[in-house]
Image (spheres, grey):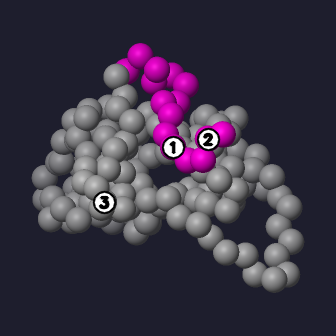
Amino acid sequence: MKFRGFEVVKGYEDKDIHLPVRKTKYSAAYDVEAAEDVVISPYQLGCKPTLIPTGLKAYCLEDEYFMLINRSSGPKKGLVMSNGIGIIDRDYYGNVDNDGHFYFQYYNVLDHDIMIHKGDVIGQVIFQKYLLVDDDCAEGQRIGGFGSTDKK
């Protein structure tokens, strides 16, 4: 039985994607690399965040999710996650829209472009358990990929 882990998403099988690893014995997070070269332009009012593909999907147990978080050096390098942290639910894995491919969303707060190269560590993943309230009755089913919670 598989409990939690990473896999390469469809379409990236031949792109030399490295599965995330923890760098030290007591690290809480798995370092994630960029799957492609990406240029992040300086932030301007009204601009959308730049999505950096990872070429990865992740699976976990029913009472778990995983968080996408910035590296501690990210803001020093001008990278700020647009949503602070990203929460990825268990049912995002393998969805029909994008096979569960997760991306990091960044703004560049410097005054010049930031070049992300394939293989650069762009963020981290931490797996977590979550709790339910006594009267929880959620029975909905995921119908898509990125941003599908708000789709009607």
Amino acid type indicated by mark 3: Ser
Q: Amino acid at mark 1?
A: Gly
Relative side of 71 to 7, left or right = left
Query: Is 15 situated above or below 147?
Result: above
Figure quadrant of residue 70: bottom left
Q: Is residue 11 magenta?
A: yes
Q: Give the prevailing secondary structure in the magenta stretch.
A: loop
Mark 3, residue position: 27
Q: Secondary structure at mark 1?
A: strand
What is the number of the mark on residue 132? none
Mark 3, other Cα within 10 Å: few <14 / some 14–19 / many ≥20: few
Residue 5's label in the rendered image is: 1
For the residues labelled 2 and 3, say whether their Cβ atoms are less than 8 Å apart: no
Q: Quadrant of residue 89?
A: bottom right
Where residue 3 sits: x, y (%)? 60, 47
Q: Nearer the viewer, residue 99 or 3?
A: 3
Measuring from the top left, give residue 119's x and y in whole percent.
25, 35
Q: Is residue 147 visible?
A: no
Query: In the image, which disc is placed on residue 2?
Result: 2
Q: Are marks 1 and 2 in contact (CB under 8 Å)?
A: yes
Real-space CA distance between mark 3 and mark 1, rounded to the nearest whole angstrom: 16 Å
Q: Residue furthest bottom?
A: 134
Residue drawn at x 83%, y 58% is 140
Q: Which residues are magenta?
A: 1-15
The residue sitting at 44% across, 59% down in the picture is 126
Where residue 8 appears, as percent x and y from the top left, is 48, 30
Closest to the observer: 134 or 73? 134
